[in-house]
Image (cartoon, grey):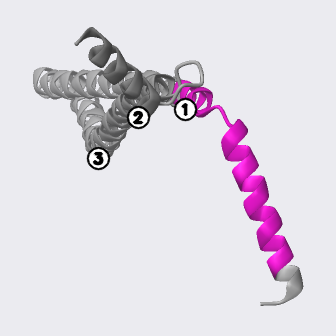
Amino acid sequence: MSLIQRISATLTSSVDRAVSRVENHDAIINAALRDTQQAAARSRVRLERVKKDGHNLRTRHANLQQAEARWTERARKIAADDETRALECLRRRKDCEVQIRNLEESIEKHDELEARIAEQVKKIEARIGEVAQQRNMMRSRQSVAEAMRTINNIEGVSYGEIEDTFDRWEINLG
């Protein structure tokens, strides 16, 4: 390893150590969690829009089916009286059938997309829960570590010295 690489590695590790001492882990996690929660909220809003679009597609599909039935019925009613109008009604019914087929394909693709988005939103929300739980566990561990440090260093007296003091006190009482 060359001298420059060694110096570079030493400087990098020194900077990393300094950053890890200064870094406020709780604040970083809270900021990341907040950003993720906002992104999840935006995703839920977009999912609702997709669901609304799906509902609109289904409504349009139902309307087209009703229109197809109406054109069929009109063609039957006027077939005896006016053949050209009946043929026009059948042509319009055929247009409705084509639109219905196209719309059914769109609805199928839309449903697949909606399911994928819903699954991704669930995964995001699950991950948010995991991160929040892990953050709470780390906070608890930090509190315990701080309490242990405090116990071990009560006013500069080590834990062993406290035990010795209790032993002397007990001997004195005895």
Classed neighbour count for the residue bearing mark 1: other residues with Cα under 10 Å, few (<14), some (14–19), many (≥20): some
**80 or 21, which lies in front?**
21
Instruction: Pick the residue in front: 41 or 154.
Output: 154
The Cα atoms of the two marked residues, 2 and 1, are separated by 8 Å
- Mark 1 secondary-structure assignment: helix
Q: Is residue 113 visible in the rendered structure shown here?
A: yes
Q: Earlier in the sequence, mark 2 or mark 1?
A: 1
For residue 44, which quarter of the picture? top left
Q: Earlier in the sequence, mark 2 or mark 3?
A: 3
Which residue appears at 32% of the width and 23% of the height? 167
Residue at position x 58%, y 18% in the image: 155
Do tag 2 and tag 1 residues touch (Cβ < 8 Å)? Answer: yes
Name the residue tied to disc 3. 105
Tell me which amino acid carries mark 3.
Glu
Q: Position of residue 147 (x, y in %)?
A: 44, 23
Q: Secondary structure at mark 3?
A: helix
Mark 3: give few (<14), some (14-19) or many (20+) Cα within 10 Å.
few
Q: Mark 1 — residue?
A: 29
Q: Is residue 27 magenta?
A: yes
> Which numbered mark, 3 or 1, is in the foreground of this view?
1
Q: Is residue 45 left or right of residue 101?
A: right
For the record, the magenta segment spans: 6-35
Q: Distance of mark 3 from mark 1, alpha carbons? A: 44 Å
